[in-house]
Image (cartoon, rainbow, N blue to C red):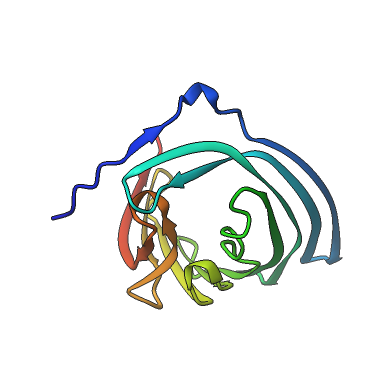
Amino acid sequence: TGVYNPISWQGSPGSLDLENLIAYEAGWRTLVTPGTLLDAAIFFKEYDDLILYNRKPTIATSSLSNDSSATVSGGEFTLTARILDDLTLRSSYSLSHVDYHGLHSLDNSGRDMEQRFHLEAYLDLTDDLDLRTFFQYCDEIPLYDIESQWRMDATITWKANEQLDFALVGRNLFDPSHPEGKNPLVSNRLVEIERSIFLIATFQF
């Protein structure tokens, strides 16, 4: 079941320009110990001619325009450590800040998360069986009233032979669902990712 909500568009697609990006990045990598690798990076990005989706509040008429620009600045570091012969940990932290300029710049304030952290663990249970777990922290998104949240994924893989393996995958295991953002095409409806568990079989010829 659903609601039919037709949307008409104003303007010509040919009147839109391509979005432009200029990115500046610098990075550093070092081997802290024989089993520990550290990566660090900083970045600054300039976006011009961003395509905006402009929907009128009272009627189902929308338009696209190149009426915005933005700058993104931040940094990220990643640490990979082989704790045991059968266990490897990988963690990363990133911080970024977005400034929008031009039309609707105030409306876009707070639409992007600033902090993100994740921790991965790779464990070889046997020669044919391994486990991967993924923990992630996502910062709040104030514009959409989305609170900060933790997420967990897990995958256990069994290698049946040289050509065939099976993987049991669980996504979003902490909650039945969690919000990721809003869809401007459907009245800014909240987009949620549901918990899922599935099996993957891979055969290599």
Relative to 158, is 32 on the left or the right?
Answer: right
Relative to 184, is 37 on the left or the right?
Answer: right
Screen quadrant of the N terminus: bottom left
Which residue is at the far front?
58
Closest to the observer, 127 or 144: 144
Image point (39%, 58%), residue name: 188
Closest to the observer, 172 or 20: 20
Closest to the observer, 146 or 126: 146
Q: How many marks?
A: 0
Q: Quadrant of residue 180?
A: bottom left
Question: Could you tell me if residue 141 is visible in this image?
Answer: no
Screen quadrant of the C terminus: top left
Which residue is at the far top?
14
Compared to 6, does 128 lie above or below? below
Image point (69%, 58%), residue name: 98
Relative to 45, is 6 on the left or the right?
Answer: left
- Find residue 74 and report its horizontal and vertical position in percent: 76, 60
Image point (17%, 54%), residue name: 2
Question: Could you tell me if residue 70 is visible in this image?
Answer: yes
Compared to 40, does 115 lie above or below? below
Q: Quadrant of residue 170?
A: bottom left
- Find residue 4 and report its horizontal and vertical position in percent: 19, 47
Image point (77%, 43%), residue name: 23
- Find residue 115 and report its horizontal and vertical position in percent: 65, 69
